[in-house]
């Protein structure tokens, strides 16, 4: 079953079980997918649906950070609950150790030795981890590895 069909099925289940948090979050996700389809004037394939889900998850993480800075713990909790629902439909994210393997390989391929070559490293690395790793974590791992290389 593809992700869109799974979302529809889960939305019906959430409505039957009166799980308001899941129902509302799934409605937001379905609306975002529909909006992407209208904007692109085509039906989204599985990869495009995953991109919408990743964008929604990223939006929730950024909102949580901003609400946290503003001391709005109630809104942080709401965004966190939505993020939990969204993450059910995303592939398992890579750990920092898994990202480091790909990062070292990209650094070796580019011959990079410092942060000035970050763009070249990321260009080699991101196709391997896109959709499987958080961009901030990837950036942090690469920065840490370059820092270790620079200190040698």
Image (cartoon, rainbow, N blue to C red):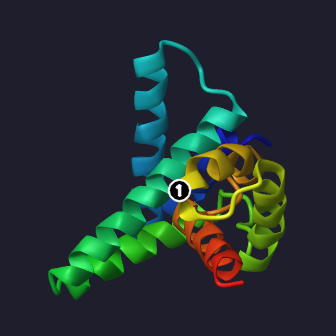
> Which residue: 65% across, 84% down?
151
> Which residue: 72% across, 84% down?
152
SS class of the residue under badge 1? helix
Q: Is residue 94 above or below residue 112?
A: below
Answer left or right for 116 relative to 72: right
Q: Quadrant of the N terminus?
A: top right
Q: Is residue 48 above or below residue 72?
A: above
Is there any visible trace of residue 88 in the rendered image?
yes
Is there any visible trace of residue 12 in the rendered image?
no
Q: Which residue is mark 1?
A: 116
Q: In the displayed image of the protein, which residue is found farthest to the left?
A: 70
> Which residue: 78% across, 55% down?
106
Residue 69 x, y percent position in the rendering:
21, 81
Q: Is residue 58 above or below residue 72?
A: above
Residue 150 x, y percent position in the rendering:
64, 76
> Which residue: 74% across, 66% down?
92
Nearer to the camera, 136 or 124: 124
Answer left or right for 26 relative to 122: left
């Amino acid at each position: 079953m593809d992700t869109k069909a799974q979302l529809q099925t889960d939305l019906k289940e959430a409505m039957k079980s009166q799980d308001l948090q899941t129902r509302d979050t799934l409605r937001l996700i379905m609306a975002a997918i529909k909006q992407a389809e209208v904007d692109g004037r085509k039906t989204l394939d599985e990869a495009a649906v995953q991109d919408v889900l990743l964008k929604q998850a990223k939006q929730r993480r950024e909102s949580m950070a901003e609400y946290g800075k503003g001391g709005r713990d109630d809104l942080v909790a709401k965004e966190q609950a939505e993020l939990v629902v969204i993450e059910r439909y995303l592939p398992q994210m890579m750990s920092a150790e898994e990202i480091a393997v790909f990062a070292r390989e990209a650094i070796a391929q580019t011959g990079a030795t410092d942060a000035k070559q970050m763009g070249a490293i990321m260009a080699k690395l991101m196709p391997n981890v896109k959709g499987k790793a958080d961009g901030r974590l990837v950036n942090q791992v690469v920065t840490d590895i370059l820092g270790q290389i620079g200190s040698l």
